[in-house]
Image: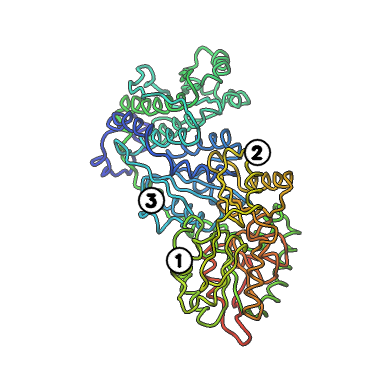
Amino acid sequence: MERVGRATVGATTDTARVKPPYSSELEGLNATYTRALVADIDQLRGAILDVGRGPAVFVGSGGSMVLAHLAERLHEHVCRQPARACTSLELLDLPQLERRGAILFSSSAKHPDAHEVLAAFRRGRFSPTALVTHRSRVDVQQLASPDTRVVTLEDLAQPDGFLATGSIIQIATQLFRAYMEDPQLPRAIDVEAETDEADLRNEVLVLTPPSLTCVAADIEIRLMESGVACVQVADLRNFAHGRHTGYSRRIEDTTVIVLSDARSQALAEGTVAAMPEVADLRRWRCDSSWETTVISLLARSMRFIDKVGRRLNVDVARPAVPAFGRRLYRLPLRRRISQPLVGGVERKLLAGGAGHDAAGRTFYREAASAWLNEFGKRRFAGLVLDYDGTVCWTRRRWELPDEHVRRALEILLRQGLVLGVASGRGRSLHADLRRWVPVQHWAQVVVGLYNGGVQLRLDEDLPRLREPTAWSRAVTSAVGDAPAAWRLKVDERGVQVSVSVATGVLHHGQLATLLQARLAEAGVEAQVVASGHSVDILEPVSSKTSVADAVERRAGGVVLAIGDQGQLGGNDHALLASTSSSLSVDRCSADPLTCWFIGSGEYVGPDLLRRYIKSLRKRRGGFAMTGAEIS
């Protein structure tokens, strides 16, 4: 009781009057779990497939760290890609990698920490990204990037109180269903509380196998956040490397909870057998499937804290929150931590596969200075843009571009600029451009569909595009014999074959490599490029560079090329590598003479394109970009 009394010094009690008791959360747990077993998981599975194609981080705060730990293990064991569970602050401190996705678990997404994580997502420091929340896309549209997938969960049977309860069971269940084809989950949750666990000592040591780290985290969070015990977590073997000595000195004050599943049972039993007789040991075990074990032990942790709290006369769902705790919780991060931004020099280093390289940084800084000096002198008569990921956000590619981007381009067209648009898309792009480009400027716009395989002016009607050819049939036949062909969705058009992953997880870069090898084996000549959402197989003569050539001929002067996938193998690489007058709004090549990212990294994608376009000024002899700087 004294322990709890110290935790509530300076507390306010307004929350205690409005929140239901913890017992009501436990009563609603089975209903929430039953709903989670049958809930639509298409959105969540889509997010997992996105991030599952590469390394990923899973972000939680407080109770949602349990979900981050669970997702970390599922990601590595199912997707076979590196993963990491981290807090919001840890994520904001992470360096940018060449590719790394991220998922944020935040029920309300209202906390300042969540806002900063979503801001990092918008700056493109992680890609792809998702937010798993109980709020709708409309509710968070001012916070979340258009390229961040928002996974909206259905309401809980009983809302959570101070400790996350129903949301943990709900999301954990859906994570199992989304990651695993046939998860062996229990039919219901046992809601009966154990009768012999309430009497804890002042300190708790949780020993866990790696497979149950999420359960250990749940126990630690519930006991620490409710203030009923101090908790330490160690895995079953790390405990044997020195921590047992510290434990022996405090053995009279410590309760040990030993977790185990079927795989770790023998190790857990050996550990328990080696402990002294005076130890206060509690065995938490389950011999069912790993999925059932996790759900069952999470539910046990939730019941456990209720029993402990009742013994101490504390309702853990509505504690008296100290005034300083409220100040800490609401403390905004902005302006209190440095914002790691990734500018042009860092992106060049990433493209070259370099780590923290002082000599490389010096090289690219000098190259950037020399490139900017020449770039600033150029006058452009035309502009060639990639579309998805550059003009519009990749996840909103079926919508019109942002109004600010459209207006900025319309101004350039009115001033006489010739515009080229080069994209892997077909007739849908032609139709979309006609929806927002003023009809009087259609003749100024050169459209390169299917990555330049089909070219026409916007004022020209579309030819028939989807008729198969001998070349496309040969490609489709070869792809049908490719490794993992059963996972693939193939869209055959006459001049391009687009391949995406229909089931399972496979990184687009890896898929592009596999398809390139298969086409070579089949003797089919083709180009293979990866975009943000698919792999496009092109005829050998097709190229976005041909669109730039057409714009240059029509404009009678130098053309500026801008895309978002300038890295080697990206579908803008050929375009941006073909001229020193090229910019990226996201990923760059390692070439010091082409494909530079201008700016600090605060803006990427269409947000950065808008700033590029607004920096173009009409000058004698063409258009010049003003104020260009490379960080």
User: Please, what is the three-letter code of the amino acid marked with disc 1?
Assistant: Asp
Q: CA distance from mark 3 to mark 2?
A: 55 Å
Q: Nearer the viewer, mark 2 or mark 1?
A: 2
Q: Which of the pair 540/579 is nearer the observer? A: 540
Left or right position of 499 against 328: right
Q: Which of the pair 397/443 is nearer the observer? A: 443
Q: Which residue is mark 3?
A: 327
Instruction: Categorize mark 3 by other alpha carbons within 10 Å: few (<14), some (14-19), many (20+).
Output: few
Q: Is residue 600 visible?
A: no
Furthest-left residue in this view:
17
Element carrying mark 3: helix
Q: Nearer the viewer, mark 3 or mark 2?
A: 2
From the top left corner, tell me how far across and down residue 322 is, in percent.
34, 44
Q: Which residue is mark 1?
A: 402
Q: Which of the pair 215/368 is nearer the observer? A: 368
Q: Which residue is mark 2?
A: 483
